[in-house]
Image (tube, rainbow, N blue to C red):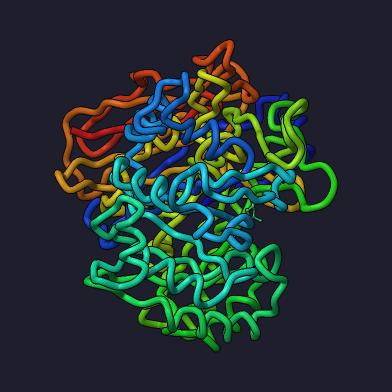
């Protein structure tokens, strides 16, 4: 990375138009691709939180809102388009207070509970195991069940696994059949607790390690179903948690989770989702990019214990976390989503792709109506967020071969002593041999001229799509749902092994080479 130090405050530098004086140069090594980008990097997370489930994914079959077997038609179709590879459920913090038996059987007989974590809302359990696993089948995605360790029992979790996956004449398989499902589901991913250091039980890593060993022992593989067991992992900078788990649990886990939010802090205001200045914007991207250091440090610890990389790192919560939208219910964490959030998505993916030797899954929080959501709903209305469009543009990278690349561009200093390159990029080759390149110009003021050197890649044509808007704080509302959306991108020329791209200020582009 070619770092040019820009003195003075960022805002002033931006006003003076000091950026993007030289073309950025990206070199893509088309002949050096080794690592597949697992599709699970594009995973989602659905939590019983606010209107994520009720009103977001699920309205019930009797609703006036158009639905397919109770799932909102508009939301379902939009998600189908994204090719969601894996969906984590039922939490989050909710998972460690969830008792799955309350969510099976006739709906009118299901007991209600208080959702203590999220605003004290009454949860009627009408969306339970069947509703979740059937949704995954309809979407064609892997379910990722997050089990209750904090307030549950070993027996409860063991029976849940049996209920979902046992084909035989076992007590739980019989109960499932009584509830209308004959064939067992396939459930691959099983989380053994969530944030066990916090809302999942306030445990120390040594204690949790023993609990993990105990709980996971009784989570069996039934009838050809092979569980991929994921231990509850660290919060962002807690490297000790990872060290202790690797040491004391080791190969008993298939994956170890990690949570990292682009958030200003855990106490006080997190800042508005829609009202922010340029400095806040650049700070956000600096904080977002810091995940690269965090990943590297957790991975280095894992490498020390597991050089063969048998244990996956699972980033099962990530994304932006802002103050709740004014006028919404406290504790429901409903936030709007601007073009700034879209950059957090694109920059994050550009980083994730580089670490997939160890990083095997990432689940953005949350799929509908909560933090950095794909979709927002209100009654029968739905909007697709700028983040949705990044997931849509980037889906070409799912299961494609990552192509190593170097980016030479200007780098600016942002608040909290972080550095921010003005250009971010990633590239991959899909199964049909097509190369896709995603580029982000984070500069608010200036277009970027980019030279892309294609080494070991032959192509004669290029086409692309762009996501941008007049203002960085633009978002899609129920009144104006199409302010930020994808458009064809034309400002690119191909000349043998070189692309010349003119990337407008604050824009994200994905190119396809043909
Ligand atoms: O995503 C919201 C909450 O953040 C999740 O429930 C919890 O796991 C994390 O603290």
Nearest the eye: 431 or 402: 431
Q: Position of residue 298 (x, y in %)?
A: 55, 71
Nearest the eye: 513 or 392: 392
When the figure is inspected, residue 348 is found, relative to residue 63, above or below; the finding is below
When the figure is inspected, residue 15 is found, relative to residue 191, above or below; the finding is above
Residue at horizontal 53 percent and vertical 49 percent from the top:
110
Extreme residue toward the right, this view = 268
Q: Where is residue 331 in the image (x, y as percent from the top left)?
A: 73, 42
In which image quadrant can residue 176 be found? bottom left
Q: Position of residue 386 (x, y in %)?
A: 51, 28
Q: In which quarter of the image is the C terminus?
A: top left
Q: Where is residue 492 in the image (x, y as percent from the top left)?
A: 33, 25
Extreme residue toward the top, this view = 479
Residue at horizontal 52 percent and vertical 77 percent from the top:
154
Q: Can residue 377 be seen in this view?
A: yes
- The tally of labels here is 0
Residue at horizontal 60 percent and vertical 30 percent from the top:
337
When the figure is inspected, residue 423 is found, relative to residue 257, above or below; the finding is above
């Amino acid at each position: 990375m070619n770092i040019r130090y820009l003195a003075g405050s960022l805002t002033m530098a931006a006003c003076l138009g000091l950026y993007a004086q030289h073309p950025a140069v990206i070199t893509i090594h088309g002949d050096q691709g080794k690592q597949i980008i697992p599709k699970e990097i594009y995973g989602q997370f659905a939590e019983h939180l606010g209107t994520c489930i009720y009103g977001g994914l699920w309205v019930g079959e009797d609703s006036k809102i158009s639905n397919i077997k109770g799932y909102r038609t508009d939301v379902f179709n939009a998600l189908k388009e994204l090719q969601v590879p894996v969906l984590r459920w039922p939490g989050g913090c909710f998972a460690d207070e969830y008792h799955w038996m309350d969510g099976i059987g006739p709906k009118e007989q299901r007991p209600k509970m208080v959702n203590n974590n999220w605003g004290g809302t009454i949860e009627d359990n009408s969306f339970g195991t069947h509703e979740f696993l059937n949704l995954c089948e309809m979407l064609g995605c892997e379910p990722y069940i997050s089990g209750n360790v904090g307030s549950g029992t070993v027996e409860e979790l063991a029976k849940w696994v049996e209920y979902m996956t046992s084909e035989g004449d076992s007590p739980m398989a019989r109960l499932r059949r009584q509830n209308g499902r004959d064939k067992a589901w396939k459930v691959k991913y099983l989380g053994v607790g969530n944030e066990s250091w916090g809302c999942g039980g306030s445990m120390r890593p040594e204690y949790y390690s023993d609990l993990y060993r105990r709980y996971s022992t009784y989570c069996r593989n039934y009838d050809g179903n092979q569980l991929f067991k994921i231990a509850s992992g660290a919060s962002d900078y807690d490297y000790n948690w990872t060290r202790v788990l690797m040491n004391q649990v080791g190969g008993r886990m298939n994956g170890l989770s990690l949570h990292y939010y682009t958030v200003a802090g855990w106490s006080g205001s997190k800042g508005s989702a829609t009202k922010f200045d340029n400095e806040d914007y650049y700070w956000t991207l600096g904080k977002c990019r810091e995940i690269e250091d965090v990943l590297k440090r957790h991975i280095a610890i894992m490498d020390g214990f597991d050089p063969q990389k048998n244990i996956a790192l699972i980033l099962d919560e990530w994304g932006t976390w802002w103050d709740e939208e004014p006028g919404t219910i406290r504790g429901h964490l409903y936030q709007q989503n601007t073009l700034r959030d879209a950059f957090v998505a694109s920059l994050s993916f550009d980083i994730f792709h580089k670490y997939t030797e160890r990083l095997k899954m990432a689940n953005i929080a949350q799929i509908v109506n909560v933090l950095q959501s794909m979709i927002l709903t209100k009654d029968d209305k739905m909007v697709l967020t700028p983040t949705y469009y990044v997931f849509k543009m980037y889906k070409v990278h799912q299961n494609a071969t990552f192509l190593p690349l170097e980016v030479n561009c200007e780098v600016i200093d942002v608040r909290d002593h972080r550095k921010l390159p003005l250009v971010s990029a990633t590239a991959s080759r899909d199964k049909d041999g097509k190369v896709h390149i995603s580029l982000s110009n984070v500069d608010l003021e200036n277009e970027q001229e980019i030279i892309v050197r294609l080494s070991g890649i032959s192509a004669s044509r290029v086409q692309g799509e762009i996501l941008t808007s007049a203002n960085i704080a633009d978002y899609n509302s129920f009144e104006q749902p199409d302010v930020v959306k994808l458009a064809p991108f034309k400002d690119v020329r191909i000349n043998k092994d070189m692309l010349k791209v003119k990337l407008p200020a604050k824009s994200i582009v994905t190119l396809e080479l043909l």
